[in-house]
Image (spheres, rainbow, N blue to C red):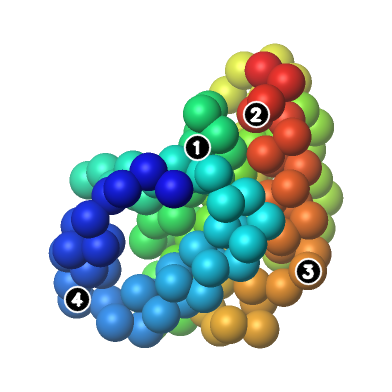
Amino acid sequence: MQNESNLDVYLFFDQHPYALSLFEQFRQKLLVMFPETGMRVQKTQITFTNPRVFACVSMAKVRKAKDRPKEYIVVTFGLGTQLLSPRIDVATEPYPNRWTHHVLISGPQEIDEELMEWIQMSYDFAIKK
């Protein structure tokens, strides 16, 4: 994994310790699957690359405030087709046949096999681009 400082990650989640713990659980599962993954901490998101971006974590507001838990992360990934699932909060097609999906994660049980299968699909899709 690209050597982004853990300090950068901690600063990203500075006011959100529970979101940091969710991020760490997601990152651990992702690195087991893809040990050579690169990571960049940016202003609004943390990106994972292969070398193309295949997943991001942010704290984007993908739901209305009344429907949003207090602490969460949003996992974003891209595919060539739209996934239809009640777990997908938002799916957009910014380019033909390139769908961006956003999944709000509010508990460790949501970082499950289904989510990681979607990340695998996104990883494969990014390699083929």
- Packing grade of label 1 (10 A; few <14, some 14-19, many >=20) is many
Q: CA distance from mark 4 to mark 1?
A: 26 Å
Is label 1 in contact with label 2 (beta carbons under 8 Å)?
yes
Mark 2 or mark 3, which is nearer the start of the sequence?
Answer: 3
Q: Report the amino acid beneath label 1.
A: Thr
Q: What residue would you read off at disc 3?
A: 113
**Is residue 90 visible in this depiction of the protein?**
no
Of residues 97 and 2, the one nearer the viewer is 2
Q: Is residue 20 left or right of residue 69?
A: left
Q: Name the residue rendered at 68%, 50% in the picture.
A: 119
- Packing grade of label 3 (10 A; few <14, some 14-19, many >=20) is few
Q: Of circles 4 and 3, which is in front? A: 3
Q: Secondary structure at mark 1?
A: strand
Q: What residue would you read off at disc 1?
A: 49
Q: CA distance from mark 3 to mark 2?
A: 20 Å
Mark 1 or mark 4, which is nearer the start of the sequence?
Answer: 4
Quadrant placement of the C terminus: top right
